[in-house]
Image (tube, rainbow, N blue to C red):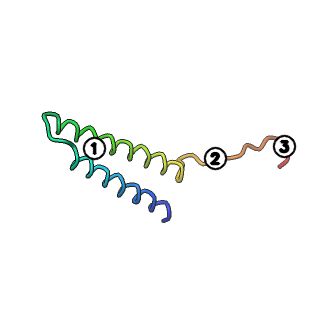
Amino acid sequence: MASVIPVIFILVIVLGLMACGFLFVPKGPNQTTIRTAIMLTFASCYLMWMVTYMAQLHPLITPYRSTKAGESL
C-alpha cells in the first residue's frame, strides 16, 4: 500500500500545476493552444514518471541468479 502514496501525491502536485497553467495563461489569440500544450506536457510527464515508478516497484520479469557448475556463493 505504501507504493500508492507517492503516485497520488505527485498526481495532486501535477493537477495543481495544471490548474495554475490553465488560470494564469495570458489572454490572446493563442490562449487555447498554450493551455493545451501546458496541460498535455504535464499529463505526459506524469504518465511517464508513473509508469517508470510502477515498473520499478512491480517488475514483469523477476531477476534471477544464474547457477553455473563450479561457482560458489
Please count the marks in the image.
3
Q: Is residue 5 left or right of residue 56?
A: left
Q: CA distance from mark 1 to mark 2?
A: 37 Å
Q: Residues within 10 Å of mark 2 (few under 14, many from 20)?
A: few
- For numbered disc 1, what is the local secondary structure? helix
Look at 21% across and 43% down and name the residue there: 25
Look at 32% across and 40% down and name the residue there: 41
Q: Position of residue 27 (x, y in %)?
A: 15, 41
Callout 2, which amino acid?
Answer: Pro
Q: Which residue is mark 3?
A: 71
Callout 3, which amino acid?
Answer: Glu
Q: Nearer the viewer, mark 1 or mark 2?
A: 1
- For numbered disc 2, what is the local secondary structure? loop
Q: CA distance from mark 1 to mark 3?
A: 54 Å
Q: Which residue is mark 2?
A: 63
Q: Using the rendered view, name the quadrant where residue 35 is placed.
A: top left
